[in-house]
Amino acid sequence: MIGDLVYPPYIRPNHNHYCPNTHVDRVTGEPRRLETTRDSDLCGICHGRYPHLLRSLAETMPALADAVTRLKTQRYDADRVQQSGVKDVTSSWNPAALSTIRRIDEYAGELIRTITHDAPNGCVVTDTMPRPAALTAIATWHARWLSHYPTKGPEWLEQAYQLLSRATRALDTTTPRYKRIVLPDSATCQDPITETPYGPVRCGGRLTAIIPTGDEEQRPSEILCTLDPDHTRLDPMDWFGALS
């Protein structure tokens, strides 16, 4: 137990005297370091900001999902009727938005697992909940426990700041940077688009490999359908299967 918060018995407070984050004095404009709150690695301002950061991440996820493909394709049946002049939807692909969604997803997953395993009363959310709802619930019920967690509290706070900054950059991206490699004619999308008495009609759209060039982490590329970005996306491990 640390203060009025309960942690596993092997967790010990660090007894740091100053918050690792620098704050600006509102009167003088000068940077200053604040003392940590009792049995904590962060100051009161940082503790107060953490739930707001979690809610901001939750709020930005739908916008990131919309930004994955910046230009919406036409109705699929219309595209199929008139192939000439149809825009390749992968040309509007924004890999920065997708990689940011994945990072937020991983971050939320770590928080959920930590709360589930270490919090005395368990977690009010599950790993199967939609991430925006999960992050909002964590902000409401678990943010104080997380930000006071010795050593990990400052790390989670810093990661939240970084993810929010990354999300802002992804949403501000106007010209996504990536390489596009159109796979051979034999590689086509197999998602069913309609059912007939003779079986499903498959999409048949060409598959394009997307390789981000502006992502500092150089995340692996994906394979997308050129007709509909919402169709099944293939992971790099499925390249050989797509080509076979």
Image (cartoon, grey):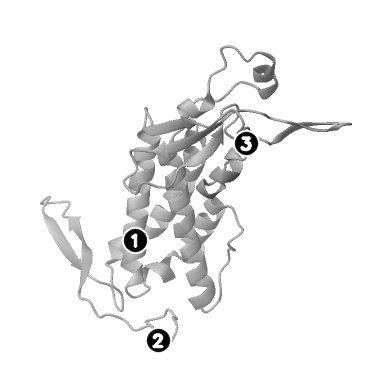
Q: Can you tell which quarter of the image residue 174 is in? A: top left
Residue highlighted by disc 3: 231
Check contact, mark 2 vs mark 3: CB within 8 A.
no
Q: Earlier in the sequence, mark 2 or mark 3?
A: 2
Relative to 232, does residue 8 appear above or below in the rendering?
Answer: below
Q: Is 92 left or right of 45, judged from the image as shown? A: right
Residue at the image point whose x is 66% and y is 24% from the top: 76
Give the residue at the far bottom of this rendering. Answer: 9
Q: Secondary structure at mark 1?
A: helix
Label 1: how many Cα within 10 Å (few below 14, some 14–19, many 20+)? many
Residue 238 position in % (x across, y down): 57, 47
Q: Is residue 203 or residue 59 the one in the foreground?
A: 203
Picture quarter with the N terminus: bottom left
Q: Earlier in the sequence, mark 1 or mark 2?
A: 2
Residue highlighted by disc 1: 157
Q: Amino acid at mark 2?
A: Tyr
Give the residue at the far right of this rendering. Answer: 197
Q: Is 230 left or right of 174, judged from the image as shown? A: right
Find residue 10 and name its label.
Answer: 2
Label 3: how many Cα within 10 Å (few below 14, some 14–19, many 20+)? some
